[in-house]
Image (cartoon, rainbow, N blue to C red):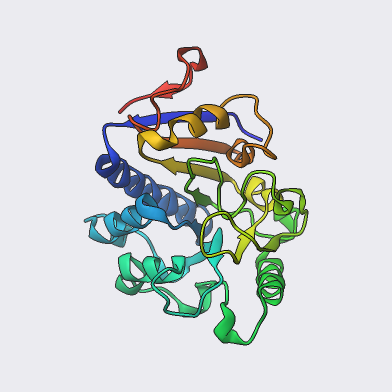
Amino acid sequence: MSVPNVVVHRDADMLAKAVAARVITRLVDAQSAKGSASLVLTGGTVGIATLAEIAASPARDAVDWRNLDVWWGDERFLPSGDAERNETGARKALLDHVDLDPERVHVMRGPDSGMTAEESADAYAEELRRAARPEDHGPAPSFDVLLLGMGPDAHVASLFPEMPALHDTRPVVAVHGSPKPPPTRISLTLPVIQGAREVWVVAAGADKAGAVRLALSESGPMQVPAAGARGRRRTLFLLDRGSAAKIPASLGRISSP
């Protein structure tokens, strides 16, 4: 796994704009190299703001949207179209505004599909398996960019501290009893997250500062799930000044644009 690099921006608005620019550049580079690209989305305030900034960017059409696979790191197990679903926010902010191939938008299904949460997780794992190539060396694609938000408790995706999902080696799991509503969710697991080429943890706000410090320390992922958020080739912690406030000066990997 790669060693994290930290980039600090002035505030949450500037962070969203900068992450949007990075996403566009990375997708264009990946498509130039191999013809297609893959992006894993996250929810949350900054995550959705980033997607809105991509939609508003003059450079957005540099991306070949028809040759992009869109995935989710986690989803709330709620019916399609529910305002609390990550998918709903992503569609409103970006996906409905670009020319995506619907077959390449990989949605985690909710209860209106007739599936249980476990069945939805298994179905998503099968979709990942079908998309994986021999060079990915695993049960899921090695995503070009996997975006993650982070909570004040250092959770990423729907992997919460000391919950059973952190021990699970399956690609996708159903999460029950989430400490953050709604209680039932679907989530990628750490092995799939760590198989991505690049993992970008995006966080804003002083309430995340303690979690950021722990995630960049020697903490274990069972207590600090974000400490396990590492990409194979590159890991970025993209932060605003508030969330970066408690990072020790000794870290030595911090840059500010």
Q: In the picture, residue 81 is in which quadrant?
A: bottom left
Q: Mark yes or no: residue 231 visible.
A: no
Q: Residue at x 47, y 35 (%)?
A: 237
Q: Is residue 214 left or right of residue 42?
A: right
The structure residue drawn at horizontal position 25% and vertical position 44%, both measured from the top left corner, is: 13
Q: Is 146 on the left-hand or right-hand side of 118?
A: left
Task: Name the spot of residue 195 as percent of width and height, x first.
Answer: 67, 48
Question: Is 174 situated above or below 204?
Answer: below
Count every numbered label the image shows and give the total: 0
Name the residue rendered at 42%, 68% in the picture: 84
Q: Along the horizontal axis of the image, is 144 left or right of 204?
A: right
Q: Is any part of residue 204 visible from this angle? A: yes
Quick check: 251 above or below 1?
A: above
Residue 70 in percent (x, y) is at: 49, 65
Quarter holding the C terminus is top left
Residue positioned most to the top: 250
Question: Residue 78 location in percent, x, y?
Answer: 52, 75
The N terminus is located in which quarter?
Answer: top right
Horizontal side of residue 92 vs 238, given as left or right: left
| Residue 180, horizontal then vertical, whole percent | 52, 56
Q: Vertically, is 110 above or below 141?
A: below
